[in-house]
Amino acid sequence: MRERLKSLRHLLEVYEAIETMRSIESQRALTDVREAEQAICRQRTILQGASRLGHQALQDGDRLSSSFAAAQQDAAVWREARIADVLSEREERSALAQHEYLDSRQRSEKMKLLADGAAANAKEFEEKCLQAAADDRYLSRKRWKQIGRRDEESRR
């Protein structure tokens, strides 16, 4: 019984380690998603700045600055599209990592319940054995006394 309990506790430690590993993977995947979202925000900021610069250049009649602003806008749009693709991939990986973490957490919780139940059963079994031994001692003493009384009565 103790060997089984020891094995279950060791297995529980393995499940908890896997849960921790999956949690870290999930956090990293979520961080990657946030990083891509921030990169998209930066590209939008660049796009807005280039748009204002282009608008101002058109008002001033500066064709060189206007061309430069248009090139910046095109580059920002292109980079944002590429980052959006990366973001989509990262969101998928994050969702998968989150699912794996939740699955490992459920398994860990089930194993914890199993280990706790086995520990309670082992304790109950041990208590029953102790009570049985105490009962056996009591009955042995009682029987011994009864035999002793019969011997005394038969001697009389």
Image: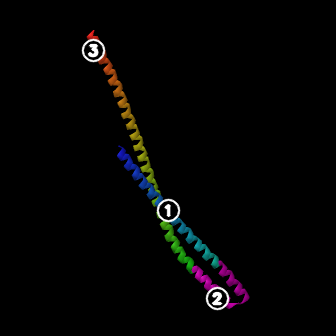
Q: Quadrant of residue 56?
A: bottom right
Q: Secondary structure at mark 3?
A: helix
Which quadrant of the figure contains the N terminus?
top left
| Tag 1: amino acid | Ile
Q: Quadrant of residue 149?
A: top left
Residue 28 is situated, as x and y percent measured from the top left of the image, at 51, 65
In this figure, which residue is indicated by the disc labeled 1? 24
Circle 2 residues within 10 Å: few <14, some 14–19, many ≥20: some
Residue 103 appears in the rendering: no
Stretch in magenta: 48-77
Q: Secondary structure at mark 2?
A: helix
**97 vs 56, nearest the viewer:** 97
Secondary structure character of the magenta stretch overall: helix
Q: Residue 4 lies in magenta, yes or no?
A: no
Q: Is residue 96 left or right of residue 42?
A: left
In this figure, which residue is indicated by the disc labeled 3? 151
| Tag 3: amino acid | Asp
